[in-house]
């Protein structure tokens, strides 16, 4: 069986395992581990505290540093959007495209890596090739964070990492961070005719949002001169606000769901420090009326950005193998910044378009699958 045929068959298997972030990914992890072990990889399954989710760390070649990581997340978003013309968890072929939830984000890349296992096993590797499959990227990169922490504790320092998120095989060496929060406001309900007897959480939440927008306006003028991103500054977005029970009731509860996409780590630290100070000020006002009132910022997820760096060997290799003239940057986040925190040189490059992700009739063109396999096959000369 040729590598393309094998990869398509594996992709069909992966799509049939509906690893939505809210559910377990263990069937996929166990299947991938069995497959890789069959071809000689040494596999370690790292389960979370529930046992329902796990990362997979597999290694071909010698146990030395400076290896290459091929990394992908196993979870997908729910397939609840209207407009699906086929079963999202049964791969369908049409017009040289492969349809199904996760085809491009990002089981297509995982299928390519698994499909290459027999070839990688036959390489006379001087440095290891690692396969990293993670859980819960879509909801906060929790799996990758746990994996990177484990690698750091074990003293493992891979030299390079390729994260196969959908980029149309363009080589990405930088992206913004993504920090997601929910800020909760607990006030005191009361009748709307007596506002001085309650603590209106909606009012304080509105003031908090106003301050966030003032901070965002200031950040627009603080973009680093050489920022390669679009827009070049750290952005803040208010995604959702919920408050109160009825128009004639003082809102006792409110919450704001918001995100920040920093272009540099210090921006995130400064924003959080300012907003936490402001929350203390608001809380002091609220507690004059109701001592039990409080404001709490909940961390939903904090994903490090990927910072472009000179002398990035992974970028040089990926550009040579894809024929790219150079690297690009994007504003969406990935797990790459977590691997970079280990001192690993990273790029994001994979089959499919981010425009097809998280939408009905998600698909991956066969030409993208072939291009990814060509890149992976070309890595042999860099690793032997």
Image: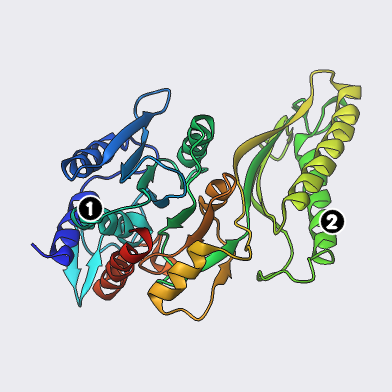
**204 sits left or right of 105 in the view:** right
Residue under circle 2?
214
In percent of width and height, residue 150 lies at: 48, 32
Q: Which numbered disc covers residue 305?
A: none
Image quadrant where residue 282 sits: top right
Residues packed near mark 1 inside 10 Å, few (<14), some (14 to 19) or many (20 plus): many
Quadrant containing the N terminus in the rendered view: bottom left
* SS at mark 1 in the image: helix
Residue lying at 39% horizontally and 67% vertically, measured from the top left = 356
Quadrant containing the C terminus in the rendered view: bottom left
- Mark toward the viewer: 1 or 2: 1
Q: Which numbered disc covers residue 117?
A: 1
| Observer able to see residue 362 | no
Pick whichever, 189 or 152, lies toward us. 152
- Of mark 1 and mark 2, the one earlier in the sequence is 1
Image quadrant where residue 349 sits: bottom left
* SS at mark 2 in the image: helix
Residue lying at 22% horizontally and 53% vertically, measured from the top left = 117
Q: Furthest residue to the left?
A: 1
**211 sits left or right of 328 in the view:** right
Colouring rule applied to residues: rainbow
Pick whichever, 382 or 77, lies toward us. 382
Q: Furthest residue to the top?
A: 291
Residue lying at 82% horizontally and 27% vertically, measured from the top left = 198
In percent of width and height, residue 225 lies at: 79, 71
Residues packed near mark 2 inside 10 Å, few (<14), some (14 to 19) or many (20 plus): few
| Observer able to see residue 98 | yes
């Amino acid at each position: 069986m040729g590598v393309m045929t094998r990869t398509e068959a594996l992709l069909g298997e992966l799509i049939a395992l509906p690893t939505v972030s809210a559910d377990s990914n263990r069937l996929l992890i166990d299947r991938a581990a069995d497959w890789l072990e069959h071809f000689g990889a040494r596999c370690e399954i790292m389960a979370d505290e529930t046992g329902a989710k796990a990362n997979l760390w597999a290694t071909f070649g010698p146990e030395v540093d400076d290896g290459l990581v091929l990394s992908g997340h196993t979870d997908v978003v729910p397939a609840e959007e209207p407009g699906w013309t086929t079963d999202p968890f049964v791969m369908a072929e049409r017009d040289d495209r492969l349809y199904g939830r996760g085809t491009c984000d990002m089981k297509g890349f995982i299928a390519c890596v698994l499909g290459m296992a027999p070839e990688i096993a036959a390489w006379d590797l001087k440095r290891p090739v690692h396969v990293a499959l993670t859980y819960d990227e879509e909801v906060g990169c929790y799996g990758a964070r746990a994996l990177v922490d484990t690698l750091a504790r074990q003293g493992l320092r891979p030299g390079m990492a390729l994260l196969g998120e959908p980029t149309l095989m363009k080589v990405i060496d930088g992206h913004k961070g993504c920090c997601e929060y929910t800020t909760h406001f607990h006030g005191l309900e009361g009748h709307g005719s007596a506002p001085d007897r309650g603590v209106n959480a909606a009012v304080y939440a509105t003031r908090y949002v106003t301050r966030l927008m003032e901070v965002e306006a200031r950040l627009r003028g603080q973009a680093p001169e050489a920022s390669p991103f679009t827009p070049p500054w750290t952005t803040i977005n208010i995604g959702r606000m919920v408050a109160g029970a009825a128009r004639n009731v003082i809102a006792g509860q409110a919450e704001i769901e918001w995100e920040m996409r920093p272009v540099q780590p210090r921006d995130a630290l400064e924003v959080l420090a300012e907003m936490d100070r402001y929350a203390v000020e608001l809380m002091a006002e609220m507690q004059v009326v109701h001592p039990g009132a409080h404001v709490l910022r909940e961390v939903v997820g904090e994903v490090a950005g990927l910072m472009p760096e000179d002398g990035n060997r992974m970028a040089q290799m990926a550009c040579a193998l894809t024929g790219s003239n150079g690297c690009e940057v994007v504003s969406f986040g990935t797990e790459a910044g977590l691997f970079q925190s280990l001192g690993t040189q990273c790029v994001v490059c994979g089959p499919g378009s981010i425009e097809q992700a998280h939408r009905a009739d998600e698909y991956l063109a066969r030409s993208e699958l072939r291009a990814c396999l060509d890149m992976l096959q070309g890595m042999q000369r860099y690793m032997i």
